[in-house]
Every structure is written in structure tokens, then in C-alpha cells.
Image (cartoon, helix red, strand yellow):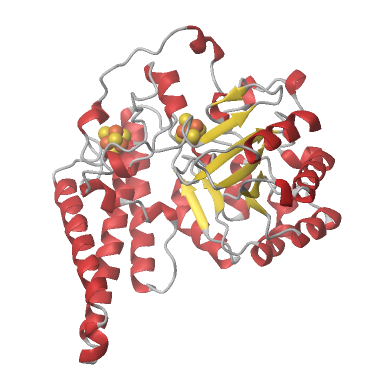
Amino acid sequence: MSLYEADCSPQVETKILGLNLTEQCNLNCSYCYQGARRDNRRNQMSFETATSAIDDHLSRDDEFKDVLIELIGGEVFLYWPLVRDVITWTLDRHSSWKKHFSFFIDTNGTLLNDEIKAWLFERRHHVVVGLSLDGTPEAHDLNRSDSYALIEPHIPFFARTWPHQTVKMTLHPSTLPMLFRNITHVMSLGLPVSANVPLEDIWGPLAEKAGHVKIFKQEIEKLVDFFSSNSQIPLPSIIDLPIAAVTSEEDHDRPWCGSGRNMVAIETNGRILPCNRYAAMSFDQTLFDHPPIPKAVPCDGCFFKAACQTCEAHNWEVNGHPDARTSFHCEFIKVQIWGTAQVQAVRLEKRVREIKSMPEEERLAHQDELALIRRQLVSVAAVLEHLENEAIVPGAAAF
Ligand code: SF4
Ligand code: SF4
């Protein structure tokens, strides 16, 4: 997986307990940040470690009512009996837990079979499985170990069992020119898409990066056109950033993720971490020996900060401190913010016209919605105004 493939959303009412069941994976994806540091000696969590962490967090008297237990790898279906036994053990004791709980499993989708699928389907209200899929067979196979053919027979199962669960799509320079096709391909399979620009420094020298940004903008324009004309279709996350947060004072400095706040992760050997990205297979462990040193970065005064993803662990590795944001993805996120604002402007204005054309009594019942839309349009206008003054990358397309 790439950095941003982890589910890092700060849903503060829910505790996220990540259990790193294994470091092993049966694929060797080109962009996987874990590949270089994976160590097969620490390759499996024991049943006792997993169930004792679950027992601990589901029995606590703390402020969280819900616990989402994420089973993380590597590829966890390499250890299917462990997955099955840990979930069964937890469900069997459901009446004794103090918390509501559910399970989430990340998978590359290559190791499912009829037995596993039947078992998961029966428990689909307690266990959600999220698939990684990069788009068309051509795009997917470029970076994900030629695995499309192994996943393809299982795609209808995912669409039928968890129709609202997004597929994780990781962007890469090689797949950028196919972005529109990749997103619409996955949506045509009945699955919503969460497509993420990696946070790592993968875009090459400035001139090369400028070329990638230009292609990215062309693809985002296609998405904006498509989703503006088809306003009944939910937006893919790539053009659905939280831009209202940009103009909200309250949200401007909120943490992007829940690492060490409402998130906790348990490594295969039982070590407790702020999130899975700090595990030995993902993070430079020597950094724990020294206190992080705060450093000024260009993001500090950025208008768009509240809509821009960041990873505290990656920041620490690159810039020496969890709060010193990396900005390798800066130009791409601004294109996404631009795309989000464009499509929102069209959809919100359309909704205003719909409300205004309603009979008076019905229209009056929509006054609160109208007021909310007006506030959202103010945020959209502020974002577009700021972007007008931005050149994305010297030599590349400007807004
Ligand atoms: S990466 Fe760019 S858009 Fe994101 S916070 Fe930093 S300067 Fe702002
Ligand atoms: S530090 Fe935050 S963004 Fe990075 S992997 Fe952990 S939870 Fe996700």
C-alpha cells in the first residue's frame, strides 16, 4: 500500500484499533512503502495478542462508544484462519463488551475463495472488507503485480456485499493519463472510488513534475465535466475534498488524522503505536531515539491547509517533526481543490434553481437548505479566488 492508502480519517467519536496481523504480502506492488522494510521474522500476530488487545479496548470505560477494529497487513487473508478465529471470538462475546464494535479488513482481493466469501457474507453487518483496485486491467496491472485477473472473479461479490464501501485506488505517474477512465471503470463495476495522490516524493524533477500536474489537471477536468452533467451520481473523493473547512476558522488547524488521538495500532509483536504507519515495516525506527525538532515549512501559512491531506509519520520522516507537513503533493491537491470547487459550484447552483422553482409552500420548507447552500457557495467562491492567483508549477498550466 502507499502512504495514503491507510484509512486515516479523523472520526473522533469512534476509536480505531488497528491490529497488524501480518507483515507478509503475496504481491509486490511497485509503490508499496512497506516493501523495503518488511521483515518476515515479525510476520504474524498471535491469536492471544490480537484477542487481548480487543478485550482491553472493548472493555474500557472511556469516552468512545464505538470501536472499529481494523485488521491490517501485509495481506491479512494469507492468515485466513487467524482472521476467522479472531472475529469469531469477538462476536461470540458480543454481549459482554462495553462498546459497539465492527471490523474492517483491507485486502488486495487476490486470495478470496468460496468458503471465505460465504463466511464474510454471513457476517457482512459486522465485517466490512475494502478492496484495493487501480482501475482498468491495464492500469491495475502496471503497478499491482499483474493481479487484476485474480481479483476480477470476486468484484461482483464486493459490489453486492458492501456496495457503499469505496475501493482504494492509488495514483502513480504511470496511471495518471488514465485517471478518468480508471475511476469510471471502477464505478461501472458498482463500486465507489477513493482515489488518492500519494504523499511521497514520486514526481521527479520540476519539469517532469510539471508534466504530470498538467496531465492530472486534464483528467480532473474530464471528471468535473462528467460529474457536473451527472449530478445524481455521488462524487468520487478525488473531487470531493472538504473545502468548506478551508474558510472555517474552527477547522483550519484541526489534525488531519487520528494518529495517537482516536487511533491506536498494535504491531505483530504486541507493541502499541499511535497508528500503523509507525510500525517497523513502515517507519524509520531510529527516529524514536531522538525528540522531533519543530521546523518551519511552506504549509504553515497555507490558506488550503484544512482541505489538504497530510501524514504525521511521513512528515516526521521527511521533515523531522509530525507537524512539519510535506508538500510533494501540493500542486496536485490544489488541482483537486479546484476540481471540487468547480463541481460544487455547478451542483449547488443547480439545487438553488430547483428550490426556487418549487411551489411557494415547498420552497419555504427549504429555506434552511438554501441558507446552507449560500454559505457553501461563499466558500467555493473564496477558494476559486485564491486559486486564480496560483501558478500550479512554473511552466505548467495555471488556474
Ligand atoms: S501541501 Fe500545499 S496545499 Fe497542502 S498545506 Fe502544504 S502548501 Fe498548502
Ligand atoms: S500518521 Fe496519520 S495520516 Fe499517517 S498513517 Fe498514521 S493516521 Fe494515517
The percent position of residue 170, horizontal first and vertical second, equals 52, 44
The percent position of residue 313, horizontal first and vertical second, equals 46, 25
Q: Which of the 4 image quadrants contains residue 73?
A: top right
The percent position of residue 171, horizontal first and vertical second, equals 48, 43
At 55% from the left edge and 49% from the top edge, which residue is drawn? Answer: 168
Residue 46 visible, this orientation: no
Front-most of residues 162 and 102: 102
At 73% from the left edge and 52% from the top edge, which residue is drawn? Answer: 95
**In the picture provided, is 333 more to the left or to the right than 169?**
left
**In the picture provided, is 327 more to the left or to the right than 169?**
left
104 in relation to 4, above or below: below
Residue at the bottom extreme of this rendering: 359
At 35% from the left edge and 25% from the top edge, which residue is drawn? Answer: 323
290 in relation to 143, above or below: above
**In the picture provided, is 327 more to the left or to the right than 393?**
right
**In the picture provided, is 372 more to the left or to the right than 289?**
left
Q: Which of the 4 image quadrants contains residue 200?
A: top left
Q: Which of the 4 image quadrants contains residue 250?
A: top left
Residue at the top extreme of this rendering: 289
Front-most of residues 171 and 276: 276
Q: Quadrant of the N terminus?
A: top right
287 in relation to 32, above or below: above
